[in-house]
Image (tube, rainbow, N blue to C red):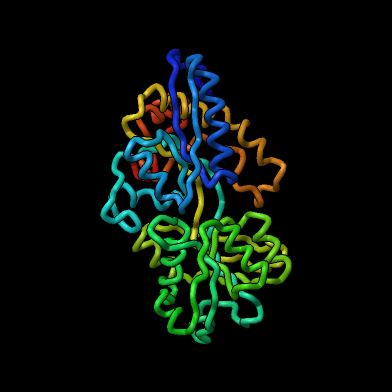
């Protein structure tokens, strides 16, 4: 079911924060800017800022009213922002609300050089190699770095343990930088997300890494302690992957605003997300679905189920269109 195309008669200025400037958040922001401004007053404008760090700055920009909208991944991290837990301890962001969630299939994976002779976390703990692991920074700003260290700790390998083996993390900000180190042979392992990207496929198919399956006990611990989900890559996801691979989920892009965004603006933005999604989907449809950073086609019923409560204006759209069934948080 679709709804009548809404219009915003007055002009409205929007400020978005995307990614580092060349990744998927910027593409999504550009599409959403275009669709919104086409349906708002004649002097409507939108600007897109880039981040420099690991993403947490975008959350506080929205919380503090510096920008109007950002995108955040993974979806599982956002409830902690509302309550000031985990990475957000001491600095909560209770005013965050969602316009919707854009579907995406991703996970966090640790992969080792085959020369290490290790294919499981059990063997890793037993052998205790002095690994140099390429990973994102765990500096209080980077979602990837934060989640990756929690995953390692849940497997009994916190940073102190790794150092006691003579190992260390070689830190960058973006996934491509970490995987690039692995491709160049300057590290022994890589701990990253964005597993659908060509650079991940390249190192796996070239036999430069063996991905370690996450352990059941670790995944249960992460779910119980942090609310993190699990993911499973099917056999054949990479040609070299002969059996399913259990992993920590790192999926979905949540479109985030403040709770005091005008209701008609949030309503129009949510309408654009769901009703004009072909505009962003076509930018990824040339990729096989398993290689696409965004899962297509978008399903509005799933878009209406973010990990934090919907903005009332967005919820009104999903209700009018018959898509709303309650968010994951039950609100």
State whether residue 325 appears in this view.
no
What percent of the width, then of the height, locates residue 93? Answer: 31, 45
At a point 42% along the width and 42% down the height, the residue shown is 306
At a point 41% along the width and 27% down the height, the residue shown is 266
Which image quarter holds the C terminus?
top left
Q: Is residue 29 above or below residue 313?
A: below
Q: Is residue 279 above or below residue 201?
A: above
At a point 33% along the width and 52% down the height, the residue shown is 80
Seen from the viewer's position, the closer of residues 96 and 276 is: 96
Decide if residue 130 is on the left or right side of residue 98. Answer: right
Count the numbered circles shown.
Answer: 0
What percent of the width, then of the height, locates residue 90? Answer: 26, 54
The quadrant where residue 110 appears:
bottom right
Q: Is residue 175 above or below residue 149?
A: above
In this view, which residue lies farthest toward the bottom? 127
What percent of the width, then of the height, locates residue 118? Answer: 59, 80
What percent of the width, then of the height, locates residue 242? Answer: 68, 68
At a point 50% along the width and 62% down the height, the residue shown is 136
């Amino acid at each position: 079911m679709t709804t009548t195309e809404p219009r915003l008669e007055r002009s409205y200025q929007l400020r978005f924060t995307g990614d580092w400037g060349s990744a998927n958040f910027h593409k999504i922001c550009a599409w959403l800017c275009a669709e919104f401004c086409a349906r708002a007053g004649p002097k409507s404008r939108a600007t897109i800022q880039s981040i420099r760090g690991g993403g947490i700055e975008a959350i506080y920009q929205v919380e503090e009213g510096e920008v109007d909208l950002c995108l955040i991944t993974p979806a599982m991290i956002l409830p902690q922002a509302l309550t000031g837990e985990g990475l957000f301890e001491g600095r909560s962001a209770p005013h965050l609300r969602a316009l919707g969630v854009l579907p995406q299939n991703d996970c966090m994976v640790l992969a080792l050089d085959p020369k290490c002779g290790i294919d499981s976390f059990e063997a890793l703990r037993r052998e205790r190699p002095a690994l140099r692991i390429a990973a994102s920074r765990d500096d209080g700003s980077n979602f990837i770095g934060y989640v990756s260290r929690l995953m390692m700790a849940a497997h009994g390998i916190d940073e102190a343990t790794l150092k006691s083996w003579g190992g260390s993390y070689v830190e960058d900000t973006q996934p491509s930088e970490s995987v690039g180190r692995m491709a160049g042979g300057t590290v022994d392992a890589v701990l990253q997300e964005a597993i659908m990207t060509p650079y991940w496929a390249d190192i796996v198919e070239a036999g430069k890494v063996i991905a370690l399956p996450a352990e059941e006990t670790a995944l249960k611990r992460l779910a119980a302690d942090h609310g993190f989900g699990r993911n499973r890559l099917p056999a054949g996801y990479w040609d070299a992957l002969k059996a399913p691979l259990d992993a920590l989920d790192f999926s979905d892009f949540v479109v985030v605003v403040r709770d005091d965004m005008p209701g008609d603006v949030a309503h129009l933005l949510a309408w654009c997300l769901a009703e004009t999604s072909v505009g962003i989907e076509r930018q990824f449809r040339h990729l096989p679905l398993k290689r696409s950073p965004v899962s297509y086609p978008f399903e509005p019923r799933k878009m209406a189920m973010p990990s934090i409560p919907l903005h009332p204006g967005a919820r009104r759209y999903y209700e009018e269109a018959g898509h709303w069934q309650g968010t994951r948080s039950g609100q």
